[in-house]
Image (tube, rainbow, N blue to C red):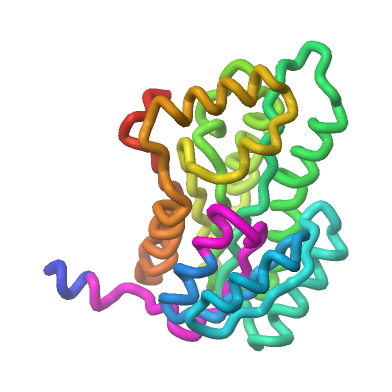
Amino acid sequence: MKTTEAAATRRSLEGKAILVTGASSGIGREVALALSAAGARVAIGARRVDRLENLVASAHGEVLPLQLDVTDAESVQRAVGETVGRFGRLDALVNNAGLMQSGLILGADVREWQRMIDTNLLGSMYAVHASLPHLLATKGAVVQVSSTAARSASLGSGVYAATKFGISAFSESLRQEVTRRGVRVIVIQPGFVDTELTSHITDPMMQAAAADIAASMRTLRPEDIAEAIVYALSQPEHVSVNEILVRPTDQVQ
């Protein structure tokens, strides 16, 4: 197939209804803007709903701001219900909400472990569970924003990496369950991205290490990940881009 013919078969996002979690900043914000620019109708969910107002003003098309706490299964159900109520359908879920609180295992504050597991892993699962009946109806897609930490754990990232490894396992099981019913499952694994994610780190040593890593390379921008997601969602129905690994050119691990 010629390049122009392949481009013509790509799935248009015009009018598609897409829910993005963790949309108040960073990757989530840029994903919402990119999807809106591509013609999608976008529901944007976050705990900090006040920060969504500027995003609504910056978007190109119809945007629905939602109060959403992914750690609360009922909050997730409400957000999905409001999205479908407004747009009449749901074509894709972008699971982006995440938390990184790096630190050593010895002497760790286990409450930080619980917050990461609740947000990164269970929050993702809750959103899939609530969205799946609607995605089956539209032959839609689930996009899981994961991390290179899902491929290789490092010192200080044990629990964070565990949540991302968990997303990979859950996503592959989900893919096998729904792929023959037309739902695509896409896992995005970004390397070091310039976002506020590292500001969640409370361990001074780990915070300094993250700053050193960022200073040593040309980090990715949130827009880079947004472009990867738009690309994956725009593929024709017979093409499922199940995994995209995106690292800064300067990143070694």
Q: Nearer the viewer, residue 154 or 167?
A: 154
The image shows residue 68 at horizontal and vertical percentages of 77, 64
Q: Residue 180: tell me if it is visible.
A: no
How many tags in the picture?
A: 0
Q: Quadrant of the C terminus?
A: top left
Residue 47 versus residue 100 in the image, above or below = below
For image coordinates 40% across by 25% down, the residue present is 216
Q: Residue 29: tell me if it is visible.
A: yes
Residue 89 versus residue 44 in the image, above or below = below
Residue 27 picture quarter = bottom right
Is 9 within the magenta?
Answer: yes
Residue 47 picture quarter = bottom right
Q: Nearer the viewer, residue 201 or 79?
A: 201
Q: Is residue 217 left or right of residue 164?
A: left
For image coordinates 69% across by 21% down, the residue present is 204
For image coordinates 36% across by 36% down, the residue present is 218
Q: Which residues are magenta?
A: 7-31
The image shows residue 106 at horizontal and vertical percentages of 79, 11
Is 160 within the magenta?
Answer: no
Residue 221 versus residue 103 in the image, above or below = below
| Residue farthest to the top, as pictured | 106
The image shows residue 148 at horizontal and vertical percentages of 50, 34
Residue 64 versus residue 110 in the image, above or below = below
Q: Quadrant of the N terminus?
A: bottom left
The image shows residue 79 at horizontal and vertical percentages of 76, 71
| Residue farthest to the left, as pictured | 2
For image coordinates 63% across by 61% down, the residue present is 23
Q: Is residue 152 left or right of residue 122?
A: left
